[in-house]
Image: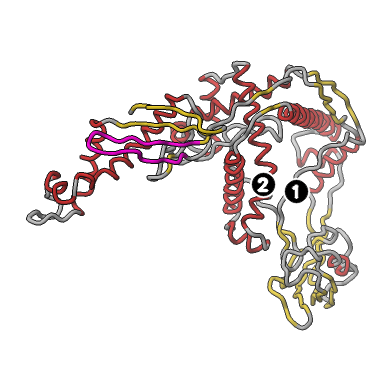
């Protein structure tokens, strides 16, 4: 392989001209002959027995060129990328310039990672707001303990109340017609949970076991099912059971029974310590997010649109894999929510753009400050990943390139560097936290009966490495397929 030329044809786009010599090309043609000869018919020879010279005489020397080119150009492209010192961020467009018995030449046009400038990333001013542990916080931990150890009992001597679990049958009608998805039998509904459409749960409260009654509701105008949106409906209901969680009294004996502590005071002290650590960690994450926001705002780069598009694709695939872990296909989810793929994918645009910008900024800082992961740190990360996937370390190394691990660890070092060099003022608060940015909305589906379906949870498998800050997460390495420099005749894979 020889890199003939490298030319920047426009911003962030490079054209490489690459040649493959006669010796390599001849070996590839010979291999193509051996691979295909059994499928070639030559008069006078049994299938698979025709010499190559006879095959080429009958069909032309070019018969094996295409297979030979497809076999050789991926590796040739990959070597040329390394020699040119570029970092592709998209698949390359490949054009064969010439091919004959002396080899072939091709051009590969590819989008490359942009030049990035980061300024003023040292000495950033930020406030770290740490919540002070209060008696209410400790009591909340005690209440959680009581809830975990409570027991469900049936109530038969009163009507259903807010907070009860009502076990009901229901069937929904618009006019005289029952609608799809509006029927359930012995469904446990927590009154006051707002898991059914507005107005439903309030009308269940007040009824007694055995009551049969109607619940009249109006579906919201923005309801996901167009045939129900804004329409009035009647649910025919029957109340079978009323259940309530009975909570235990809290004393030293209870603490001894359900924890490793000997008294309520010991439990409270431990809870205070753990809450303090939790609040400190949360404040650290928040201030790191603020610092990264500033770094990104101060970054200058002409980022190719394809980088955002690929990040969006990764997020869609990640969402789909989490759905599949719950037994649902993405196609079914889109049908269920009434969304088109383009609209669903667009939900990730802002997050994808932010992720790309964060990564570019942190990579640049790591390069400027010579922040790199040691071999020991890489090995330790491989061990953590293997534990997360519950497989052997050597097996995880087959899936995840060490270079990807090094990049992710370098990004974490960049975050640590920015934080350690920031001018951070620490403040504490008790009752009310300083205003925060509104969190990104999560996609959720509503059933026709009004029950909300939670967004898909993340699978248990751990990611390669995650930055300590919530929004500045590094790219997760999954169980990837082996990289290829190119996969088709027209494209080279520039990962």
Please give the name of the residue rendered at 65% of the width and 54% of the height, measured from the top-left corner.
344
Location of the N terminus (image quadrant): top left
Residue under the point 83% across and 54% down: 246
- Residue 470 spot, x, y in % from top left: 71, 35
Residue hosting label 2: 348
| Residue stretch rendered in magenta on the structure | 92-110
The image's colour scheme reads: secondary structure
**Residue 129 sits in quarter:** top right
* Vertical order, 202 against 410 (above or below): below
Residue 289, x across and y down, in percent: 75, 31
Q: Nearer the viewer, residue 290 or 7?
A: 7
Count of numbered badges drawn on the protein: 2
Q: Which of 30 and 422 lies nearest the eye of the viewer?
A: 30
Which of pointers 2 and 1 lies earlier in the amino acid sequence? Answer: 2
Residue 386 visible in the picture: no
Nearer the camera: disc 2 or disc 1: 2
On the picture, is 145 further left or further right than 93? Answer: right
Residue 387 in percent (x, y) is at 54, 34
Q: Is residue 120 left or right of residue 268?
A: left
Q: Badge 1 local density, few (<14 within 10 Å), some, or many (20+)?
A: few
Q: Determine the secondary structure under disc 2.
A: loop
- x and y percentages locating residue 346 in the rendered image: 66, 50
User: Which residue is nearer to you in this view: 150 or 356?
Assistant: 356
For disc 2, the neighbor class at 10 Å (few under 14, some 14 to 19, many from 20) is some
Mark number displayed over residue 418: none
Q: Give the labeled residue for mark 1.
A: 441
Residue 108: say if magenta.
Answer: yes
Q: Main secondary structure of the magenta part?
A: strand
């Amino acid at each position: 392989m020889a890199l003939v030329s490298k030319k920047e044809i426009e911003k962030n786009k490079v054209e490489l001209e690459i040649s493959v010599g006669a010796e390599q090309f001849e070996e590839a043609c010979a291999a193509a002959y051996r691979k295909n000869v059994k499928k070639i018919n030559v008069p006078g020879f049994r299938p698979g027995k025709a010499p190559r010279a006879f095959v080429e005489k009958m069909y032309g020397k070019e018969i094996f060129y295409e297979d030979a080119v497809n076999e050789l150009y991926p590796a040739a492209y990959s070597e040329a990328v390394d020699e040119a010192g570029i970092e592709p961020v998209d698949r390359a467009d490949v054009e064969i310039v010439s091919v004959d018995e002396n080899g072939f030449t091709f051009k590969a046009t590819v989008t490359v990672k942009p030049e990035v400038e980061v300024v003023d990333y040292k000495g950033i001013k930020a406030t770290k707001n740490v919540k002070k542990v209060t008696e209410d916080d400790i009591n909340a931990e005690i209440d959680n303990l009581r809830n975990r150890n409570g027991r469900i009992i049936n109530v038969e001597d009163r009507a259903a109340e807010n907070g009860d679990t009502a076990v009901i049958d229901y069937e929904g009608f618009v006019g005289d017609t029952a609608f799809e998805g509006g029927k359930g039998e012995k469904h446990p509904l927590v009154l006051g949970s707002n898991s059914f459409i507005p107005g439903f749960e309030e009308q269940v409260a007040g009824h007694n076991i055995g009551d049969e009654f109607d619940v009249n509701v109006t579906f919201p105008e923005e309801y996901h099912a167009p045939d129900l949106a804004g329409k009035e409906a009647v649910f025919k209901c029957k109340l079978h059971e009323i259940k309530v969680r009975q909570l235990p009294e809290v004393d030293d004996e209870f603490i001894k029974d359900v924890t490793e502590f000997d008294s309520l005071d010991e439990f409270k002290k431990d809870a205070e310590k753990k809450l303090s650590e939790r609040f400190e960690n949360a404040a650290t994450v928040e201030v790191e997010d603020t610092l990264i926001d500033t770094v990104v705002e101060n970054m200058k780069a002409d980022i190719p649109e394809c980088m955002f598009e690929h990040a969006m694709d990764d997020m869609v695939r990640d969402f789909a894999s989490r759905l599949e872990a719950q037994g649902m296909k993405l196609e079914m989810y889109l049908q269920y929510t009434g969304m088109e793929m383009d609209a669903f994918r667009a939900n990730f645009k802002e997050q994808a753009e932010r992720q790309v910008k964060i990564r570019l900024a942190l990579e640049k800082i790591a390069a400027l400050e010579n922040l790199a992961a040691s071999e020991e740190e890489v090995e330790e990360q491989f061990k953590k990943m293997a534990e997360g996937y519950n497989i052997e370390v050597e097996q995880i190394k087959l899936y995840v390139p060490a270079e990807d691990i090094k990049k992710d660890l370098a990004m974490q070092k960049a975050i640590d560097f920015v934080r350690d060099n920031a001018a951070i003022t620490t403040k504490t608060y008790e009752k009310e936290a300083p205003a925060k940015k509104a969190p990104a909305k999560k996609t959720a589906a509503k059933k026709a009966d009004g029950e909300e379906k939670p967004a898909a949870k993340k699978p248990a498998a751990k990611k390669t490495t995650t930055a300590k800050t919530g929004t500045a997460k590094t790219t997760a390495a999954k169980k990837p397929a082996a990289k290829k420099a190119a996969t088709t005749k027209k494209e080279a894979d520039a990962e």
